[in-house]
Image (cartoon, helix red, strand yellow):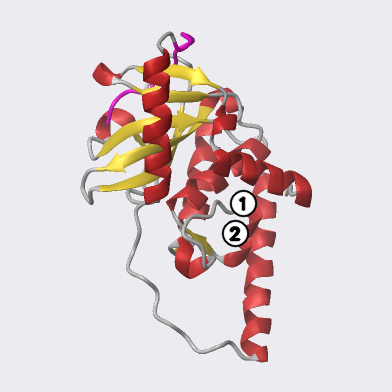
Amino acid sequence: MQDFSSSSSSLTNTFISKLFILALASFLIVGCSSTPKIPDQAKPQKAEKATAKSEADKRVATWKELIATKQNVPEDRKLSLVNDFINRLLFVDDIDHWNREDYWATPLETVSSGGGDCEDFAIAKYFTLKYLHVSDEHMRITYVKALSINKPHMVLTYFLTPESEPLVLDNLDEQIKPSSQRTDLLPVYSFNAEGLWVAKRQGSEEYVGNSDRISLWQKLLGEMQKKKESP
């Protein structure tokens, strides 16, 4: 995996910017790595719905307890706790889970529903760590190509410092590893609430502005604000 080291340089070539936007749009359309589709099931009965709600309430309560009780643990411990918690959820494609081709769920939707796809997992990890007071400057939601399965994929990357090699929080390989050990991942672009970066050759990257050009990201933030979603 290429290095995601921070860069403060601005985009200097309009042609590169246009190419990036086109690549970004096509990458988003493809979606992320998926698992086999879950089998069709009969419509849940009232008792089954009640049980599902009870289980959802328990998951949300456990998630909120994690956030409330782990505020003061070391940051590396926060990474492990959050990565493990979210990775225990079921991987489900958007079309099966939300009846949509591509949907970015809020963290609460992901946890309460008990599953999501790679985008939902990375987003849930990002916001859960933010609730644990891990700064934006340390985290990026990162789109990659998963070379082992030849599909787009999303992970969360963590930077101890702007110059340090990032750690990768992933659901394909659940062990947190430095990016240099994830040669199965090819970075495409990364973003957070503060900006957007496009990966380049030789492990470098280029800052290309703020992340408001990612429509699904802006829609997600708007939905969270509308629902006043917080732990």
> Between 165 and 33, which is closer to the camera in this rendering?
33
Helix, strand or loop for the magenta stretch, by majority: loop
The residue carrying pointer 1 sits among few (fewer than 14), some (14 to 19) or many (20 or more) residues within 10 Å by Cα, namely: many
- Picture layout, residue 209 above or below residue 221: above
Q: Position of residue 12 (x, y in %)?
A: 43, 8
Percent of width and height locating residue 82: 53, 46
Cα separation, mark 1 vs mark 2, equals 6 Å
Which SS class for mark 2? Answer: helix
Q: Give the magenta part as a residue range.
A: 1-11
Residue 134: x and y in percent read 61, 31
Res. 227 visible in picture: yes
When asked about the image quadrant of residue 18, the answer is top left
Q: Is residue 67 above or below residue 43?
A: above
Residue 99 versus residue 19: which sits nearer the camera?
A: 19
Q: Is residue 193 left or right of residue 142?
A: right
Question: Are circles 1 and 2 on residues that touch, CB within 8 Å?
Answer: yes
The residue at 74%/49% (across/down) is: 229
Q: Amino acid at mark 1?
A: Pro
Which numbered disc covers residue 111? 2
Query: Is residue 231 magenta-colored?
Result: no
Q: Residue at x 23, y 35 (%)?
A: 183
- Residue sitting at 34 percent across and 38 percent down? 144
Q: Quadrant of the N terminus?
A: top left
Query: Relative to 124, is 162 on the left or the right?
Result: left
> Which residue position holds label 1?
107
The kind of residue on which mark 2 rests is: Val
Q: Residue 2 magenta-drawn?
A: yes
Mark 2 Cα-neighbour bin, 10 Å: few <14, some 14–19, many ≥20: many
Judging depth in this view, the residue of 18 and 142 nearest the camera is 18
Question: Residue 19 placed where, x, y %?
Answer: 36, 26
